[in-house]
Amino acid sequence: MGTDHSQKGSAPTLIGSVQRALRLVEAMYAEGGATAKRLARVTGIPLPTVYHLLRTLSHEGYVQREGGSFRLADDLPLAS
């Protein structure tokens, strides 16, 4: 899992938005929940991008908002 190179020695094609979303997930896990501003600060992701990613992650059921803080959902919608 993780390394799928179609040509030997070639660099993998990485999707920046997926990398940024994963950095947010990791930061929420480490912080136990945080404001969007705090998440932007700890990840280095611009605040408007953080809001867009959080909205998407929330819509998909991965993030819950509690007041002004965001945290990972209790029941992540992962395949079993």
Image (spheres, rainbow, N blue to C red):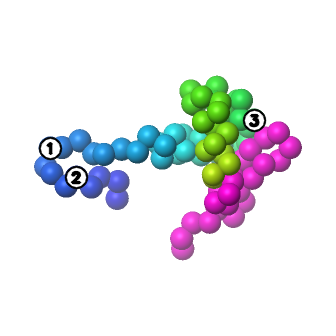
Residues at circles 2 and 3 in contact by the CB criterion of under 8 Å: no
Q: Label 1 amino acid?
A: Gly
Give the labeled residue for mark 1. Answer: 9
- Region in magenta: 58-80
The earlier-in-sequence mark between 3 and 1 is 1
Q: Position of residue 36 (x, y in %)?
A: 71, 35
- Identify the residue shown where x is 40% and y is 45%: 15
The N terminus lies in which quarter of the figure? bottom left
Q: Is residue 38 above or below residue 69?
A: above
Q: Can the viewer see residue 27 in this picture?
A: no
- Identify the residue shown where x is 75% and y is 53%: 64
The C terminus lies in which quarter of the figure? bottom right
Give the labeled residue for mark 2. Answer: 5
Depth order, front residue of 47/75: 47
Q: Label 3 amino acid?
A: Thr
- Identify the residue shown where x is 27% and y is 55%: 4
Please tell me whether residue 18 belongs to the stretch shown in magenta: no
Element type at mark 1: loop
Question: Local crowd at mark 3 within 10 Å, few (<14), some, or many (≥20)?
Answer: some
Real-space Cα separation, disc 3 to disc 1, in angstroms: 41 Å
Q: Is residue 80 above or below residue 24?
A: below
* Residue at the far bottom in the pictured view: 80
- Identify the residue shown where x is 48% and y is 47%: 18
Q: Label 2 amino acid?
A: His
Q: Is residue 9 left or right of residue 30?
A: left
